[in-house]
Image (cartoon, rainbow, N blue to C red):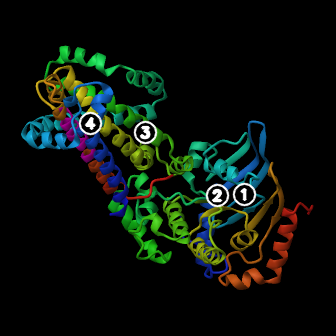
Amino acid sequence: MRRFLAPALVVVALLGLWELAARWDVLADLLNIEDFLVPAPSQIAEALWEDRSLLADDAWVTLQEVVLGFLLAAAIGIAFAYLIHLSETARRAIYPLLVGSQTIPIIAIAPILVVWFGYDLGPKLAIIALVCFFPITVNTIDGLRSVDPDLRKMMRTMGAGRLQTLWRVEAPWALPYTFSGAKIAIAVAVIGAVFGEWAGSNEGLGHLMISAQSQLLTARVFAAIVVLSAIAICLFALLTLLERRVVTWKAAS
Amino acid sequence: MLTRLREDAATTPEQREAEDAWRAEHRDAGVRIAGVRHSFGDLNVLDGIDLEARPGQVIGMVGPSGCGKTTLLELVAGLRDPSDGTISVEGEADAERRLLGCAYMPQRDLLLPWQRAIDNAALALRVAGASRQDARRQVSGHFERLGLGGFEESRPDELSGGMRQRVAFLRTLMAGRPVLLLDEPFASLDAITRAELQGWLAEVLAEDLHTVLLVTHDVEEALYLSDRVLVLTPRPARIAAELEPPEPRASDRAAAVSSPAFTELRQRALRVLGGEAE
């Protein structure tokens, strides 16, 4: 319990400051804006409660997008990593493209994807996968490459070929690295989902944020952000739990 | 592989005959190294090594650290080819074929941390295509004998250094190769565990006719376990002296290593290692 005490105190203190600043209109005056644009934490909590069914419906949509998009990214990301690890040609041909893909401004491409694929799940998955496959790929490649060279030698003396070594040594060795990448990916996946929904959508937390913003319901915008963070934190925790179940050995340092 | 009939123990003429016949049939068996030189770029590591090891023999190699002992084992194992000279293992000179004749035990135990002890020991069998169940069955019988009984399902990080080393050795043995290349198998252990494992290794070698190349920096270990000990010079390694221990793998280890002949040989080895000419 003690290890939660310090961060909890910090959060409470920040929330308290924010509450006071909002209540006394300090922030609004400082920024020279209308005071309803700066909701106090208590108002956000109120919005969370009052809009709970609305938020739940949209959160469910976003959660589905995030989970499916993440799974897609993991599949693609791991496949790329193994391909690049196994083939020097693939490394040279694909790796630069993968790095290049990360420079694509998602905000610019999202509306185009929506025009191409419509308002449904397709473009959201594409955007989520695009923003979150990369850490999975890079980490997995690093893991596969970091295998103790003596282990590879030992496998060779046992008559193991390339694939046997991959399957019996390199893949399990790289697993903790893949998990590290996946944990980074799941945190960005929710942002990808919001981008996807902003570009064109009738539902989801991203859509809710936009419509709330245009109605100047700032408390609701913040409430949606809180729910979004909660989704990311839960998924991250879930992944950590899975990692602990799967990687039961002490990973090489 | 012929079950070992030690010369002092091979009492009946039939047994001797069987062993002679086996030797005649396997004239190529063992390891032959002729005029081997090796360099990595400009760095000369081995400078003319010759040796012959026959089944049932242990050839010990001692030398200063970094003198190229590990390189020699890797060359024999077929992990690389020498810059010059020839190496044959069971009559095969081609590196890819040498790989099939040797089981190599590296300096570190290199156990797979995600696998249980028994699966680590069975790794070579699994690589060779045995099912998990089948491989485990073949290995499990040896666990008791190696003092590992009850630790079959332990993960490597739950085992002591001596146990890990035994699992690693069992893994090497289970590869079922005629030639064993042991690279400082007990270097990381304390003196008591090391003596214990040496005695146990002697027992294992008494049972099967393996050809063993044993690299170590422990002169006593080499003299106790080997039929012949090569003392190597600092890099680039050459053979500075060849010693014949009086009682290889004697059953009473403590007595054997304190006998006058043994002590004298150890002094000689140390003198050679210290750089004195023979």
Q: Which is more toward the observer, B47 or B64?
A: B64
Please, is residue A252 above or below residue A129 in the view?
A: below
Q: Which is more toward the observer, A58 or A77?
A: A58
Q: Magenta part of the protein: which range? A: A221-234
Which numbered disc flags the more N-terminal residue, 1 or 2?
Answer: 2
Q: Is residue A100 left or right of residue A157?
A: left
| CA separation in Å, label 1 and label 2 | 8 Å
Callouts 1 and 2 close, C-beta under 8 Å: yes
Residue A241 in percent (x, y) is at: 29, 53
Instruction: Give the residue number, with chain letter if any, for mark 4.
Output: A70
Q: Which element is circle 3 on?
A: helix
| CA separation in Å, label 2 and label 4 | 56 Å
**Camera-nearest label, 2 or 3:** 3
| CA separation in Å, label 4 and label 3 | 15 Å
Instruction: Give the residue number, with chain letter if any, for mark 1.
Output: B52
Instruction: Give the residue number, with chain letter if any, for mark 3.
Output: A139
Label 3 amino acid?
Asn
| CA separation in Å, label 2 and label 3 | 45 Å
Instruction: Give the residue number, with chain letter if any, for mark 2.
Output: B30
